[in-house]
Amino acid sequence: MKTKIVDETFDEKSGLTTVTLQNKYGHFTGMARCHPDDEYSMFQGERIAATRANIEFCKHRIVQEKAKIKALKELDLNTRIDVYAGKIKENKKIFKLINRYEKNIENYKDSITILKNSIKLMDEERQKVLQRSKENK
């Protein structure tokens, strides 16, 4: 799946950077605001906004995977009624699909955690730079 940046904007007055990503699942937008004590860094603002857009994508995929699981469970309930009509193989397929979608959800949740941690690391680095610049003054 290819994801590309389709829009990047920066508003100097508000210090807001917006990045919109697009892939086959849709458009996902993330925003980052420049801290008042910082000088604007286009690179840093875009990184944070793009990371937040990726978090939105992961949340979107979790909702989609949960909907698939719900539909499969309803299908499984309906096929259990017809178990004696040779539907046992279908139940196994449904079970495997549900397990795959549940693993996908866990992977997306892990990705969200990693992305949020990367934003925290970027902020910690910003704090260190601010501290060093204060010490040098």
Image (spheres, rainbow, N blue to C red):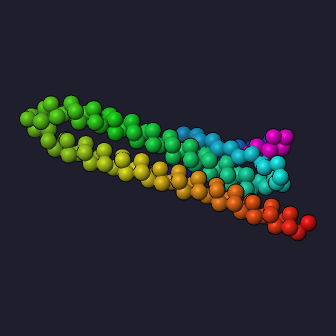
Report if residue 22 lies within the magenta region.
Answer: no
Magenta residues, dominant SS class: loop
Query: Is residue 21 found left or right of 64 in the rendered image?
Result: right
Question: Can you say which quadrant of the picture contains the C terminus?
Answer: bottom right
Query: Which residue occupies 25% across, 33% down?
Result: 75
Is any part of residue 8 visible from this angle? no
Q: Most extreme residue toward the bottom, as rendered?
A: 136
In the picture, residue 19 is in which quadrant?
Answer: top right
- Horizontal and vertical percent for residue 53? 61, 46
Query: Which residue occupies 34% across, 35% down?
Result: 70
Classify 124 as above or below 23: below
Q: Most extreme residue toward the left, as rendered?
A: 84
Magenta stretch in the rendered image: 12-17
- In this view, the residue in front, 87 or 120, is 120
- Horizontal and vertical percent for residue 79? 18, 33
- Horizontal and vertical percent for residue 16? 76, 43
In the picture, residue 20 is in which quadrant?
Answer: top right
- In this view, the residue in front, 137 or 45, is 137
Query: Which residue occupies 71% across, 46% down?
Result: 32
Q: Most extreme residue toward the right, as rendered?
A: 137
Query: Which residue occupies 31% across, 44% down?
Result: 98
Query: Is residue 1 found left or right of 83 in the rendered image?
Result: right
Please give the count of numbered marks on the rendered protein.
0
Is any part of residue 119 visible from this angle? yes
- Horizontal and vertical percent for residue 109? 47, 50
Query: Is residue 52 found left or right of 93 in the rendered image?
Result: right
